[in-house]
Amino acid sequence: MTTTALAHHTSTGQDTRKIAFWTFIGSECMLFGTLIATYLSYEGKSVTGPTPQEILNIPVTSVSTFVLLMSSLAMVLALTAVVRGDKLQTRLWLTATVGFGTMFLAFQYYEFNSFVAEGLTISTNLFGSTFFVLTGCHGLHVLIGVIWLTTLLILSWRDQLGPEKAMNVEIAGLYWHFVDVVWIVIFTVVYLIQRGPVA
Amino acid sequence: MSEDTVTKPPHAHPSVRTYLAIAAILTGITVVEVAMFYIPAISATAALAPVLLVLSAAKFALVVMFFMHLKPDSKIFTIIFTAPLLLAGLMILALMTLLGAWWLG
């Protein structure tokens, strides 16, 4: 296909924006790796409660995890629609992605509020500090993604998001899917693998 | 802008059917993970954490390979992504070892 021949061409034959964005995602791996490492290193070392076993709400988080997974599906379907030049499907799936992302944020807002009501804040204990920093940082990434995708949705409604802009949507999609894979890891290591106090 | 006039993805993306299949698999794995958490015969064993980590890694790989198109895309992107990912993994192991948190279950 000759479609990338003139698009931000490099000696590698790849689009520079895409190379730059994958590099950024690599740096984000290090960021979240650090936060996850900190959480795991201090897990079970809190001297006061509440503990993860007492406070984490697995049913609610399972639903929000499903919502984020579905947002990734909606995102790839939006990209497929943009490449096809299907405006209606583009708007539909971008709206769905933004909607699922907003729903995930609403779940997180509910979770944070209920934790604070039960006495767990960022300064309560080691669990609170590491948990809120890790999941809060992820939530901030989701919020940035929702804002980014909303701008794409607005562009689509203005008929400024045709197939020639597919790379813009693909890069936004890379960011969104990365946010999803980070949550896949957090859901497992924070919510499902709950370790008791360290002796 | 001329730069934006030719930006279709250069590789063949998976079909919609493939995307739907991947989403179904991801949902299925998530259901299995949550079920394992709630079944005492499984959640009480030392195997829970390793199995959950493997399932999580499978979900991670599926999203990266198919939704992020790393599988059909240039190997350059795979290298750019996996190098810092491995470094992050090593950092997690190193920090957990240094702080005496290297235990599971």
Image (tube, coloured by chain):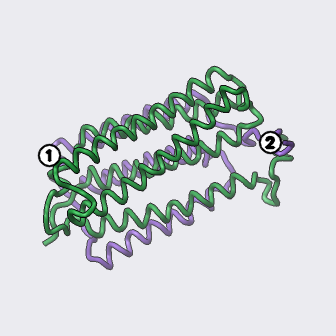
Crowd band around label 1 with a 10 angstrom C-alpha radius: few (<14), some (14–19), many (20+): few
Give the vertical position of A93 relative to A9 (above or below): above
Residue A16, label in figure = none
Name the residue beneath numbered marker 2: B4
Residue drawn at (24%, 38%), measured in percent from left and top?
A: A59
Give the vertical position of A97 relative to A120 (above or below): above
Residue drawn at (20%, 58%), measured in percent from left and top?
A: B46
Q: Amino acid at mark 2?
A: Asp
Name the residue beneath numbered marker 1: B41
What residue occupies the far top of the structure in this picture?
A88
Crowd band around label 2 with a 10 angstrom C-alpha radius: few (<14), some (14–19), many (20+): some
Q: Where residue B96 sits: x, y (%)?
A: 32, 72
Q: Where residue B78 sits: x, y (%)?
A: 61, 56
Residue drawn at (43%, 45%), measured in percent from left and top?
A: B59
- For the residue pair B57 and A76, the one nearer the viewer reads as A76
> Marks 1 and 2: in contact by CB < 8 Å?
no
The answer to whether one can see residue B29 in this image is no
Give the vertical position of A85 relative to B72 (above or below): above
Quarter of the N terminus of chain A within the rendering: top right
| Horizontal side of residue A190 vs A100, given as left or right | left
Chain for colour purple = B
State the CA–CA distance, disc 2 to disc 1: 57 Å
Chain for colour green = A
What residue occupies the far bottom of the structure in this picture?
B98
Helix, strand or loop at label 1? It is helix
Residue drawn at (36%, 38%), measured in percent from left and top?
A: A106
Helix, strand or loop at label 2? It is helix
**Count of picture labels:** 2
Q: Amino acid at mark 1?
A: Ala
Q: Where residue B51 sits: x, y (%)?
A: 30, 52
The answer to whether one can see residue A42 in this image is yes
Quarter of the C terminus of chain A within the rendering: bottom left
